[in-house]
Amino acid sequence: NVCEPCTSPCQGCSGTQTSCTSCIAAHVLSGTSCLPSSCTSPCATCPPGQPTVCNTCIGTHYLTGSTCTVIPTCSGTQVLINNVCEPCTSPCQGCSGTQTTCTSCIPSFFLSLSTCQAIPNCTSTQILLSNVCQSCTFPCGSCNGSVSTCTSCSNLATHYLVGSTCLAIPTCSGSQTLINNTCVNCSPSCSSCSGTTTTCTACPNGFYLSSSSCLACHAS
């Protein structure tokens, strides 16, 4: 593993000391060899005695008639076709080889096998996973991150949200009432109640209902 100098007229080389990648002055690269040139750069070859009349060009230029023109450097949204920078065809943002061979996409599109496809608009009961709309798992009404990570419940009359899970609202017995989604026993003075444990809807024997309260009956 010793660094060896490139052999002149190579200025740069690769693999071997004589496989040129660039040349010293007054030489031109031909394949991996540096050949003497009496032509005026950027001509690589020219007729005898006509140093500015190009037959071929150095690697960074192309031939138009007998003139060498620099190959343009295209922007990220262009592609070089016949030595001209052409814009990529929307929805391609970047492209390679052709204007429709996408390497990247404009916003709201995703890349699939060199083609840009529209990102679908999911409904409120779906989530976008790998650019496909997936339905949230019941009893989720909406979800985020995964189909089973609920952000709301599909039926608020039957389920309630705890963290990211929808739990069934319990069905209470006649002597209980639902408070904070938990069945709580009614006050002993009530045989049934609603909303609070002391808001009676029915009374035990010997009592009568008066303005949501159970009062003792009096013998008459």
Image (cartoon, rainbow, N blue to C red):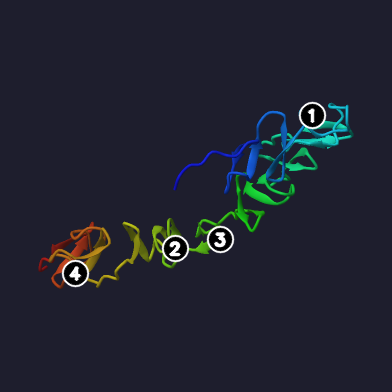
Residue at 21%, 70% (x, y): give it: 175
Circles 4 and 2: CB atoms closer than 8 Å: no
Q: Real-space Cα distance between discs 4 and 1?
A: 114 Å
Closer to the chain start, of discs 4 and 2, is 2
User: Quick one: SS at disc 1?
Assistant: loop
Crowdedness near tag 1: few (<14), some (14–19) or many (≥20) residues, C-alpha within 10 Å: some
Give the residue pinned by disc 3.
Answer: 132
Give the residue pinned by disc 1.
Answer: 38
Give the residue pinned by disc 2.
Answer: 147
User: Quick one: SS at disc 2?
Assistant: loop
User: Vertical placement of 185 versus 31: above or below?
Assistant: below
Circles 1 and 3: CB atoms closer than 8 Å: no
- In this rendering, the label closer to the viewer, 2 or 3: 3
Give percent across and percent down for residue 57.
79, 36
Residue at 80%, 29% (x, y): give it: 39
Give percent across and percent down for residue 63.
83, 36
| Residue 154 visible, this orientation | no
Give the residue pinned by disc 4.
Answer: 191
User: Vertical placement of 123 versus 82: above or below?
Assistant: below
Please tell me the numbered disc located at residue 75.
none
Crowdedness near tag 2: few (<14), some (14–19) or many (≥20) residues, C-alpha within 10 Å: some
